[in-house]
């Protein structure tokens, strides 16, 4: 039985992942903003076999509450086997271009809050000398594109932060896993036209659990995004800047 | 995946929008422009009752959470978008089974209530609606009504078999039934005529919980009515050899629309004949996992694409037992003569247990279900003929599988329709409903 903390637990990918943990009989602590949806998720996970499902209502942008979150987490669970940071928003790129406030708000949700959480939770993992820290980054963080570079910058920042954290915690026996999903059909991407590269959140959830169980460093989900992003990164900037992406 | 909001028969083609019900706590998901709305489950009803041409469908896929499970009493409460497959995945290992299940586990609980589905145990257990303890109905005026046999009982009776027209079911509470193992003891018997079918059925219904027959709808005219009778009981003990891993995942998927000429009359006739003659003995016994016994077609994903782009019709009727042999025989002969026959034609004798649903289809008598490939006008003419036969025989046609019955027939088959309309949600409508009300599929009331 694992002890699992999920932040942004009511998001589609997190929810599907939590169900896999529940079916395995794990003990869960779920963090999300909406108390009603969070309560419903806990009920669902208990029926699906979770040993326990604790909940904690928190807006991740309330950075000052992050330290207290770690405390209440360890009070409920003791040592943590898995921390999955899964919250995020998809910014309106055009809106961000027109508004500094909107841009900074998106960066707070998708980057600063993640950095804050990882900083306070890292101390706990450092003390434990064990466990897995996993964060949902994105393929969008691999290269800036005009269509969503605010999101890309936040996710790219998260990926680099995770590299450093991995480098720091690896000798202590803590695994740091960066998860980079491609196109996932969730409420966040509802308005997109879906092509053959799109997958459901359940597919990504299975990939996440597999990556955690095999102590992966960086994982693209589904796997083919590793090669797509390799090609995209290899395009010279003087060519790339003229492309409509 | 971007969802295609089609019916399983892929007929008719419609233009409709979608809105998403993303949480059971959210307000009624009203479409823009005051269009009418229709809850949409997993798109497994065949005709047009899950479609809303020029209106909107309410996608309930995200309402997929369990709420509570009392594993001592077998009472399960879950959201309406939960698939029967997910219930079984959870409940079978804890000793509980669905009290009634249709031939696919890929339907939502909400859809099972709204179509008041039935299964191979109708003669024992009645319909799905007979085992619904209560549910919550979210109306477009924002009101939430908890409905049961005691509370809002008329709305309960209208919503069971109510085809989604009374509002959005947000959650359902079901009474499951206890089982000792995941296995089913099965016997398969050959019969050579409809008379023999009735004989075997009568003899079986007493001792066997599940009974159904496959009938060879393409047999030579001298052998019309031959088939295989399948009967099963939940096994009290699993045979040691039967502990093979369950194949719950589909094993293949039809990824393309198969061109129409592939499933031609001759191919189907060979298939049917082979299937009939494969079993040499008169009676064959075995033990089977519940999945292949109840859901043999689920292993082929999107099997409806075998019928190509034009889609197909399902036809399912029930006719009174007294006249059953003659009418069913006549239907089989007409289908055969039209060269429109069918891979899977199914016969079953329904029991006496009445459903609470006002528009519920099952009633005492014998039911026949068959697939008919869409060959355009000829097929429509055949279906009109069958409708007339059923009407004359004082039977009924199943809305969940229908795309063609006439408004007059509907009113004859479902005399409670007028009472039903009082309980409809004013914001809800469907292509089916406008058709059987004789309003075509115009936007007049959409």
Image (spheres, helix red, strand yellow):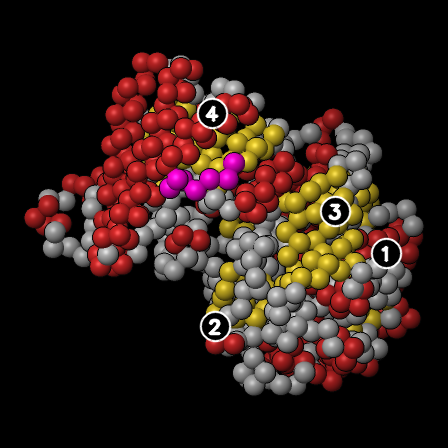
User: Which one is closest to the eye, mark 3 or mark 1?
Assistant: 3
User: Which one is closest to the eye, mark 3 or mark 2?
Assistant: 2
Q: Earlier in the sequence, mark 3 or mark 1?
A: 3
Q: Quadrant of the N terminus of chain B?
A: bottom left
User: Which one is closest to the eye, mark 4 or mark 1?
Assistant: 4
Q: Earlier in the sequence, mark 3 or mark 2?
A: 2
Q: Which residue is mark 4?
A: A71
Q: Which residue is mark 2?
A: B32
User: From mark 3 to mark 2, how far is it between C-alphas?
Assistant: 37 Å
Q: Position of residue B102 (x, y in %)?
A: 71, 55
Q: Which residues are magenta?
A: A56-62
User: From mark 3 to mark 4, how far is it between C-alphas?
Assistant: 43 Å
User: From mark 3 to mark 1, how far is it between C-alphas?
Assistant: 15 Å
- Chain under callout 1: B
Which residue occupies 84% across, 48% down? B209
Relative side of B15 to A89, left or right? right
Q: Quadrant of the C terminus of chain B?
A: bottom right
Which residue occupies 27% across, 21% down? A167
Q: Is residue B363 magenta?
A: no
Whether residue A155 is visible here, answered yes or no, is yes
User: From mark 4 to mark 1, how far is it between C-alphas?
Assistant: 59 Å
Q: Secondary structure at mark 1?
A: helix
Label ID, residue B98: 3
């Amino acid at each position: 039985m694992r002890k699992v903390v999920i932040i942004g637990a009511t998001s589609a990918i997190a929810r599907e992942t939590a169900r896999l943990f529940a079916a395995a009989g794990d003990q869960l602590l779920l963090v999300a903003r909406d108390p009603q949806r969070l309560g419903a998720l806990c009920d669902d996970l208990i029926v699906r076999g979770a040993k326990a499902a604790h909940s904690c209502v928190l807006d991740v942008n309330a950075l000052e509450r992050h330290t207290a979150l770690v405390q209440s987490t360890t009070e409920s669970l003791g040592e943590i086997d898995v921390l999955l940071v899964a919250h995020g928003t998809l910014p309106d790129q055009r809106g961000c271009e027109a508004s500094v406030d909107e841009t900074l708000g998106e960066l707070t949700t998708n980057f600063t809050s993640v950095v804050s959480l990882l900083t306070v939770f890292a101390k706990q993992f450092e003390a434990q000398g064990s466990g897995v820290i996993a964060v949902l980054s994105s393929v969008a963080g691999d290269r800036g594109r005009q269509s969503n570079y605010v999101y890309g910058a936040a996710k790219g920042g998260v990926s680099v932060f995770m590299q450093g954290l991995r480098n720091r915690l690896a000798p202590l026996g803590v695994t740091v896993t960066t998860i980079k999903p491609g196109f996932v059909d969730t409420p966040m991407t509802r308005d997109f036209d879906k092509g053959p590269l799109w997958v459901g959140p359940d597919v990504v959830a299975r990939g996440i659990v597999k990556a955690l169980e095999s102590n992966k460093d960086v994982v693209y989900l589904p796997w083919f995004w590793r090669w797509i992003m390799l090609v995209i990164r290899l395009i010279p900037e003087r060519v790339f800047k003229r492309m409509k992406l | 995946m971007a969802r295609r909001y089609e019916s399983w028969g892929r007929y008719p083609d419609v233009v409709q929008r979608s809105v998403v019900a993303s949480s059971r706590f959210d307000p009624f998901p009203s479409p823009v422009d005051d269009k009418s709305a229709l809850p949409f489950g997993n798109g497994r009803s065949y005709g047009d009752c899950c479609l809303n041409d020029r209106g909107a469908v309410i996608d309930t896929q995200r309402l997929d959470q369990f709420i509570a499970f009392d594993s001592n009493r077998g009472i399960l409460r879950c959201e309406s978008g939960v698939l029967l497959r997910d219930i079984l995945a959870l409940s079978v290992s804890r000793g509980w089974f669905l009290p009634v299940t249709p031939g696919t586990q890929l339907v939502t609980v909400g859809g099972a209530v709204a179509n008041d589905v039935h299964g191979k145990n109708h003669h024992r257990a009645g319909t799905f609606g007979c085992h619904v303890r209560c549910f919550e109905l979210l109306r477009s005026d924002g009101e939430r009504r908890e409905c049961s046999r005691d509370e809002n009982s008329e709305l309960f009776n209208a919503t069971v078999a109510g085809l989604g027209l009374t509002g959005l079911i947000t959650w359902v509470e079901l009474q499951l039934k206890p089982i000792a193992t995941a296995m089913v003891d099965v016997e398969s018997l050959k019969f050579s005529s409809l008379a023999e079918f009735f004989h075997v059925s009568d003899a079986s219904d007493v001792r066997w919980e599940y009974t159904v027959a496959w009938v060879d709808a393409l047999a030579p005219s001298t052998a019309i009515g031959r088939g295989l009778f399948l009967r099963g009981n939940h096994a009290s003990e699993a045979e040691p050899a039967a502990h093979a891993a369950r194949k719950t995942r589909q094993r293949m998927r039809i990824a393309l629309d198969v061109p129409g000429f592939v499933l031609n009359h001759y191919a189907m006739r060979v298939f049917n004949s082979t299937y009939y003659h494969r079993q040499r003995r008169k009676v064959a016994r075995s033990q089977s996992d519940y999945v292949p016994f109840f859901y043999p077609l689920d292993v082929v994903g999107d099997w409806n694409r075998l019928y190509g782009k034009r889609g197909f019709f399902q036809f399912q009727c029930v006719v009174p037992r007294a006249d059953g042999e003659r009418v069913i025989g006549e239907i089989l002969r007409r289908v055969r003569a039209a060269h429109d026959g069918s891979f899977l034609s199914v016969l079953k004798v329904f029991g006496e247990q009445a459903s609470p649903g006002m528009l519920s289809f099952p009633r005492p008598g014998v039911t026949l279900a068959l697939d008919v490939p869409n060959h355009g006008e000829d097929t429509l003419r055949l279906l009109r003929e069958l409708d007339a036969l059923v009407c004359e025989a004082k039977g009924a046609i199943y809305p969940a599988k229908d795309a063609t019955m006439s408004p007059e027939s509907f009113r004859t088959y479902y005399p409670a329709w007028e009472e039903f309309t009082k309980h409809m949600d004013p914001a809800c409508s469907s292509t089916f409903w406008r058709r059987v009300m004789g309003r075509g599929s115009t936007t007049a009331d959409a």
